[in-house]
Amino acid sequence: MKVKAATIPELITVIIVSSLLTVSIWNAYEFVITRFYQFETINQKYLTVIELDRCLSNDFLKSTTITYSHGKTLNITLYNEEVITYEFNEGLAVRKHNQNIRYFFVDVSSKGVSYRNGMNKDTLLVHKLYLELSLNKRNWALTYVKHYDAFSLINEYE
């Protein structure tokens, strides 16, 4: 009676093919996981920049006066006399409003401020804020402009 079974060379061939398949699937899995982590990291950085842009835009729109001091602190006074403070440090922008503190981990490569010319030389009102952020080896330019209304100008000269 003849027993049908696989020969040793056939078994070795199956083992080699299955091990090659396993190694290639494992490498594909590692590649996908690495790319997903890189995507999540970059996506989080973009979301941080978008959130900072949204906060600054809204605060500029709601402000009555904006001042800039010590080369890194932006003070935004709202219509209800509340003050929002932004501090721009290396790799970090901090927004403080009442007891709320928000941290934005962004790399501010350069910032610039232009002031509105006014009669009161003690108060330099910010007319334009320019931020250049470095993200993913690209520079992003963000510009915010404050158009002062008559109410703000009257309060400045009182």
Image (spheres, rainbow, N blue to C red):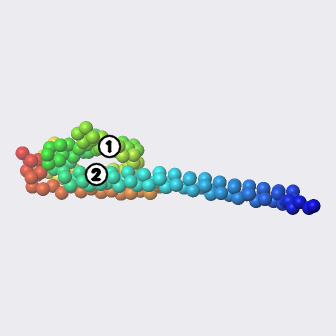
Q: Is residue 44 visible?
A: yes
Q: What residue is at 39 percent from the left and 46 percent from the top?
A: 105
* Position above or below: 82 against 52: above
Helix, strand or loop at label 1? It is strand
Residue extending furthest toward the top: 99
**Cα–Cα gap, marks 1 and 2:** 10 Å
Tell me where residue 148 appears, x and y as whole percent.
15, 55
Earlier in the chain: of badge 1 and badge 2, it is 2
Q: What residue is at 30 percent from the left and 40 percent from the top?
A: 101
Counting other residues with Cα less than 10 Å from the Cα at mark 2, is it few (<14), some (14-19), or many (20 or more)? few
Mark 1 near mark 2, Cβ–Cβ under 8 Å?
yes
Residue placed most toward the observer, 132 or 98:
98
Place residue 46 in its image quadrant. Answer: bottom left
Give the residue pinned by disc 1: 102
In the image, taking residue 137 as reference, residue 157 lies left or right, namely left
In the image, taking residue 19 as reference, residue 123 lies left or right, namely left
Q: What residue is at 44 percent from the left and 57 percent from the top?
A: 138
Residue extending furthest toward the right: 1
Tell me where residue 55 appears, x and y as whole percent.
28, 51
Counting other residues with Cα less than 10 Å from the Cα at mark 1, is it few (<14), some (14-19), or many (20 or more)? few
Residue placed most toward the observer, 68 or 62:
62
Identity, as a three-letter code, of the amino acid under mark 2: Cys
Identity, as a three-letter code, of the amino acid under mark 1: Arg
Give the residue pinned by disc 2: 55
Place residue 149 in its image quadrant. Answer: bottom left
Number of callouts: 2
Residue placed most toward the observer, 19 or 123:
19
Helix, strand or loop at label 2? It is helix
Tell me where residue 141 appears, x and y as whole percent.
36, 57
Quadrant for the C terminus in the image: top left
Quadrant for the N terminus in the image: bottom right
